[in-house]
């Protein structure tokens, strides 16, 4: 009987995750030729999609004792991060593109395919020793979240985990960060990128 319950639980979980994936639209050749853009705006626009998203992350993190705060990366990371902060009854801190935050900031640059970009966080965003869950919509090469990790750690934060709706495993970001010792969680994957 116990094993039937476990099997049912995992079957329901799998169906929900497949359903989340099916609500993410793919737009070919955006923002440039050759990119398959995984567009979570269709998931966010669907009330059932939002509910499944929140339920899935809540189930993953509600019993965790090592998360004090959610940090979200601009801009789709703000949507998923603040939903989950609310569901877990945690605070939410923004990592923003340059020049957007009004207070004193620290910055971290990171490499793009062509050139460089940077992200910023308020210097007083949280006290030293705060245990942080960093969230974004998607991990590809991992460059963006690596910059976010650096900002959190420069402020004395402890990165408990990195969480995404989508992982593109073939771009190697999640593997690289796991090899560096970070915990990485994603709800779904798109192979072949
Ligand atoms: P990366 O730094 O390479 O891990 O890229 C992650 C960031 O770029 C995230 O903030 C994503 O929103 C965005 N991104 C990268 N590749 C894609 C893609 N194929 N579809 C949608 N968003 C992407």
Image (cartoon, rainbow, N blue to C red):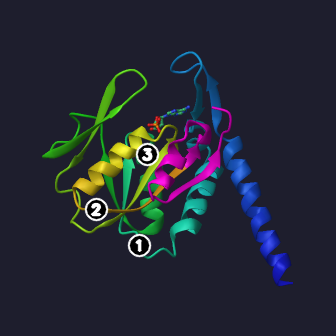
Which element carries disc 3, helix, strand or loop? Answer: helix
Task: In the rendered view, tell whether residue 154 sits above or below residue 139.
Answer: below
Quarter placement of the C terminus: top right
Residue 137's spot in the image, x, y percent?
A: 50, 44
Question: At 38% across and 50% down in the image, what residue appears?
Answer: 72
Q: Which residue is mark 2?
A: 157
The quadrant holding residue 126 is bottom left
Can you give x and y, in whole percent of width and height, for residue 127 in the image? 21, 65
On whether residue 135 falls in the magenta region, the answer is no
Instruction: Report the Cα–Cα distance between label 1 and label 3.
Output: 20 Å
Q: CA distance from mark 2 to mark 1?
A: 12 Å
Q: Is residue 169 magenta?
A: yes
Check disc 1 and report its element: helix, strand or loop.
loop
* Mark 1 nearby-residue class (10 Å; few <14, some 14–19, many ≥20): some
Q: Residue at x 16, y 42 (%)?
A: 102
Label 2 with label 1: CB-CB less than 8 Å: no
Give the side of residue 118 with respect to residue 77, left or right: left
Q: Which residue is mark 1?
A: 66
Q: Give the mark nearer the N terminus: 3 vs 2.
A: 3
Q: Are marks 3 and 2 in contact (CB under 8 Å)?
A: no
How many dots with numbers?
3
Disc 2, SS: loop
Span colored in magenta: 165-193
For the residue pair 99 and 185, the one nearer the viewer reads as 185
Give neighbour class at mark 2: few <14, some 14-19, many 20+ (Cα, 10 Å). many
Furthest toward the front, the residue is 179
Quadrant the N terminus occupies:
bottom right
- Determine whether 31 is above or below 83 in the image: above
Ligand 1 contact, mark 3 (Cβ < 8 Å): yes
Name the residue beneath numbered marker 3.
77
């Amino acid at each position: 009987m116990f094993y039937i319950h476990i099997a049912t639980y995992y079957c329901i979980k799998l169906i929900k995750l497949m359903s989340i994936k099916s609500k993410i639209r793919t737009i070919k050749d955006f923002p440039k030729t050759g990119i398959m853009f995984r567009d979570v705006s269709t998931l966010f626009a669907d009330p059932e999609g939002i509910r499944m998203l929140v339920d899935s992350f809540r189930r993953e993190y509600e019993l965790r004792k090592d998360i004090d705060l959610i940090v979200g990366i601009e801009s789709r990371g703000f949507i998923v991060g603040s939903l989950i902060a609310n569901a877990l009854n945690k605070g939410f801190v923004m990592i923003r593109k340059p020049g957007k935050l009004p207070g004193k900031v620290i910055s971290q640059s990171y490499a793009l395919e062509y050139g460089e970009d940077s992200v910023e966080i308020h210097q007083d965003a949280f006290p030293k020793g705060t245990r942080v869950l960093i969230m974004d919509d998607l991990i590809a090469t991992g460059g963006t979240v690596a910059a976010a990790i650096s900002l959190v750690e420069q402020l004395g934060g402890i990165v408990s985990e990195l969480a995404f709706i989508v992982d593109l495993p073939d771009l190697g970001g999640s593997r690289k960060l796991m090899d560096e010792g970070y915990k990485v969680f994603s709800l779904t994957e798109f192979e072949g990128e």
